[in-house]
Image: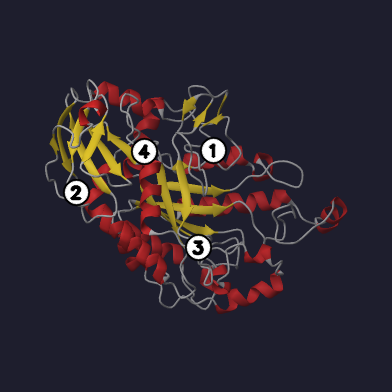
Amino acid sequence: MKKNHLILLLTLTMGLSSFSQKKIWNETEKEKTERMAWWQEARFGMFIHWGLYAQAARHEWVKKREHISDTDYQKYFDVFNPDLFDPREWAKKAKAAGMKYAVLTTKHHEGFSMFKTDYSDYNSTNTPYGKDILKEWVEAFRAEGLGIGFYYSLIDWHHPDFTIDSRHSIKVDNKEEYDGLNKGRDMAVYRKYLKNQVRELLSNYGKVDLLWLDFSYPGEFGKGRDDWGSVELIKMVRKLQPKILVNDRLDLKEYAGGWDFTTPEQFKVEKWPEVDGKRVPWETCQTFSGSWGYYRDEHTWKDNKQLLTLLIESVSKGGNLLLNVGPTARGTFDYRADQALEGMGDWMRYNSRSIYGCTQAPEEFVVPANSLLTYNPKTNRLYVHLLDYPIQNFIMKGIRDKIKYAQFLHDASEIKMGKMYGAWGKEKMKEGDVNLVLPVNKPNVEISVIEIFLKD
C-alpha cells in the first residue's frame, strides 16, 4: 500500500474533530493520528482489576451487590496485605502473552486508592501492606517496555460527599429516600476531590500513556458530565499529559478532544463502530470469566480458542482487545488466569504478525467461510485465520491476480496454489479465484494462520 493511502486509512479512524460541534482541545487529524499510532499498532493489552474486593473474592461490585456498609467493609482494608505481590512477575506474564500495554485500577467504585494520595487516608499506604502499589506497578511494567494506563472510577461508594444514586452501594427505593440520604452531601466537594486525585495520578508517576475513566450514566438518579465537571477535568488531563489517550466514559461524546476511543464492554461488535457515519478508534474490554475482580467460585471461564478468536475478531474490525486479570488478595494471578495467558502467549509467539499493526481488510477481499481476515497496510499482507480448519481445498475468491505468495505464518512453510481436488473442483472455481492447497493434517496450533503476500 502506498504511504499516502496508509495516512488516509489511519486518518479516517481518528477521532471526531472533523465532525464534532464542540471543541475542548485543538488538534489536527495528523497530530491525533501520530498520538494514537502506538496504541493502534499494539492491539492487545492487559486490564487489571485489583482492590479490597479481592479479599471478599466474590466480584468487584460485592459492596453494592450485598449492600455492605462502610463499617462492615472496613475489615477488608484492615487486613489488606498482598505479601506475594510481585509486579515484575505480572509484567513478564503480560509481555509473554503478547500484550503491549496494561491498565491498572488505581481506584475502583469502592473508593479505595491503590496509590499514595494527599486527599484520602483510604489508600494502600495505610493498610498493613503500607506501600504505594501503583508506584511499584508502574516501575515494573515500564521496565518491560509496556505502555502504562490508569483506570480511575468516577463513582465512589466510600466518599462522604458522593451523592447516593442508582449505582451506589446504598440501596434506595424512592426519591424521598434519595433526598433524605443526600442531605449534607455535596458533589462540588467530591468534584474537587476527583480532580485532585486525577491530578496526582498524572503528575506523580511520569508519562502516562492512557487514562481509563469509568463511568457516566446521565438521567434521573444518575450522573453525567456536570456532576463530574467533565469539561474542566479533560482540559486538565490534556494539559498535564498532552500525549495521553482517554476513553469515552466522561459523557463528552460530542466534544472534540473529549475522548479518543470508544469502549464496548463484554460483547463483540458486529462491525467497526461508527459515530455520525465515521469509523472511530475502539477497544473492547473483556474478562476471562464473568467477573473483573478476583472471584474464587466463579467458573464460566473462556477457553483458549474463544479468547484467541476474541482477539482476532477485534483486530479484524479495526479494534483493540483489553483482556482482564483479577489478582488475588495476596497479589498473585489465579491459576486459571495463568493458564489462559500462557495459551494466548503460545499462539502469539508465532502468529503475532497477524495482530500487531493490523486492521480490517479492505472490502475487496471476500472473507472465506469459518475464517477471519486481518490486514497490515504497511507490509501489504493479508492474514487468513482458519477458525475451522478445512480439508485440502481452500478457495480465496477474486484474488488470483493480487496474490504473490502464500505460507503458514507459524512456520513460514509454503502453501501451494493449484487445482482443486475432487470431482466437482472445476465447477467450484470461478474466474479470478485461487485455490490454496492445504495439508490434510491441521498444523499443531490452536488457530492456523495463512500469510498472503500481496502484489504492489
Left or right: residue 328 versus residue 99 is: right
Looking at marks 4 and 1 on the same chain, the residue that comes earlier in the sequence is marked by 1
Q: Report the residue marked by disc 1.
A: 235
Residue 406, by quadrant, is top left
Count the numbered circles shown.
4
Q: Secondary structure at mark 1?
A: helix
Q: Which residue is nearer to you in this view: 438 or 109?
A: 438
Q: Amino acid at mark 4?
A: Ser
Depth order, front residue of 65/336: 336
Q: List the residue tagged with mark 3.
A: 300
> At 55% from the left edge and 67% from the top edge, which residue is drawn?
123
Residue 133, placed above or below residue 130? above
13 vs 336, nearest the viewer: 336
Classify 6 as above or below 50: above
The image shows residue 344 at horizontal and vertical percentages of 32, 57
Numbered badge on residue 175? none
Residue annotated with mark 4: 316
